[in-house]
Amino acid sequence: MSLAPAALRTFAFAAGVSVANFYYVQPLLVDIGKSFGLTEAVMGLVPTLTQFGLGLGVLLLLPLGDVIDNRLLVSCAIALQALALLVMATASNLILFFGAAMVMGFTGITSYLLAPYVAHLAPAAERGRVIGLLARGGIIGILLARTVSGLIGFYIGWRSVYLLAALGMLALLWLLRRYMVPLARPTTAPYHHLLLSLVKLVRNEPTVRRTVFTQALNFGSFNSLWLGLSLYLESPAFNLHSDSVGMFGLLGAAAALAAPLAGRFVDRRGPQVTLRFALALTVIAWVVMALLPNMIGIVVGIILVDLGATASDVSNRTILFRLHPDIRTRLMAVYSIGMFFSGGILSLLTTVLWAHSGWLGVCLLGLAATSLAFLANLRGAGAPHDAYSD
């Protein structure tokens, strides 16, 4: 089985649209905080709850992708996420909004189901390029989400952003049901065995542990940049509004266009070499932004961080998907759990450090996270196939 170009483009587009739901909040954070009377330090709970919800969804729902038809699982997840987005758009109190944000995260597994689905269909020699195309869709969705939500939020209000997002997910449901085909499931393991196998993957496989640790820190750093940047640009230092803040996402989206190139580089030179280079770029980016806290330093930092984040994600996914083709959805689950719990923790730390130390505190947090990830990958690449058994 292989992927037609139209299907691949559709899946990349779907990855972008579905993952964007988690990042609409960042340019809107100040406006949402004003609506519910939140302080700067507490505003970080909004993206934190969403990321924790996604981490739980990945833990409890994503492993089902190895035993349940992915088309059915995606359809249910999208329908429930659209409902949660609608509640967020109309919530009249903070508890209801926080609860809907948690559910929206919990059901947001679509793009993380598509990654192993596409890797299964792609020929081995092209897997890096195909994963790169899907990663490009996801990264562009993350970055353009800020631009779109910033503009819509400024002109017609932040609630409109979530209403339109709910409608967009329903349209995506129709589109994906046209292109996704059922795949034979290689296992019929009971649900509790699926969950226990996640623990075994982390416990028994050094490659999985290192890859998850690396991407967790890298993704947390990426989140810190865009959350901290929204607060910094709307502060008296720049005094911009959500529409202007969102436009900075275009810089990152342009950098994310390099994802297929990163995938081809992975296919030629190997994922470990690409990963080290990507992490080094991100470390340099945080140093630049700490030393040059002006518009020039920010622009350079955005481009380098997004280039590094894209290449790192492609490299790490390629490393994982080489391990065990029959359990790729569970590998993606372990990978994503680390990402989103780290993303949630660093989102909260970003707002706390911003409230106490300003932009320099945000930069030091991002630098610490990416430096740890880089140091963890200075050692050998590890065994190409670690021991695992269902």
Image (spheres, rainbow, N blue to C red):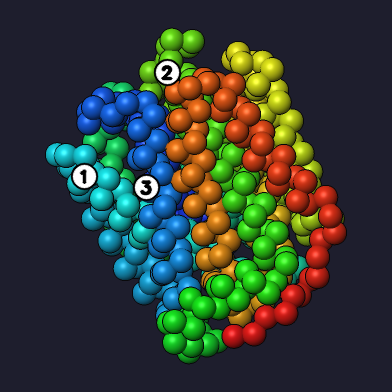
Quadrant of res 240: top left
Q: Amino acid at mark 2?
A: Glu
From what the image shows, is residue 146 above or below residue 201?
above
Residue beneath disc 2: 234
Nearest the camera: 114 or 121? 114
Alpha carbons under labels 3 and 1: distance apart: 12 Å
Would you call the spot at circle 2 few (<14 residues within 10 Å), some (14-19), or many (20 or more)? some
Look at the image and tell me in which quarter the C terminus lies: bottom right
Nearest the camera: 31 or 136? 31
Tell me which residue sits at (37%, 47%) in the image. Answer: 49
Q: Is residue 216 left or right of residue 280?
A: left
Would you call the spot at circle 1 few (<14 residues within 10 Å), some (14-19), or many (20 or more)? few
Report x, y in % for residue 359. Answer: 55, 21
From what the image shows, is residue 189 above or below residue 160?
below
Tell me which residue sits at (42%, 52%) in the image. Answer: 52
Tell me which residue sits at (72%, 65%) in the image. Answer: 207
Tell me which residue sits at (59%, 69%) in the image. Answer: 331
Report x, y in % for residue 197. Answer: 55, 78
Q: Is residue 162 left or right of residue 342?
A: left
Report x, y in % for residue 322. Answer: 71, 70
Indicate which disc, 3 or 1, sits on the residue closer to the N terminus: 3
Residue beneath disc 3: 49
Q: Amino acid at mark 1?
A: Ile
Indicate which disc, 2 or 3, sits on the residue closer to the N terminus: 3
Report x, y in % for residue 154. Answer: 31, 23
Q: Amino acid at mark 3?
A: Leu
Residue beneath disc 1: 95
Look at the image and tell me in which quarter the N terminus lies: bottom right
From what the image shows, is residue 268 above or below residue 261?
below
Indicate which disc, 1 or 2, sits on the residue closer to the N terminus: 1
Nearest the camera: 85 or 250? 85
- Residue 18 in view in this figure: no
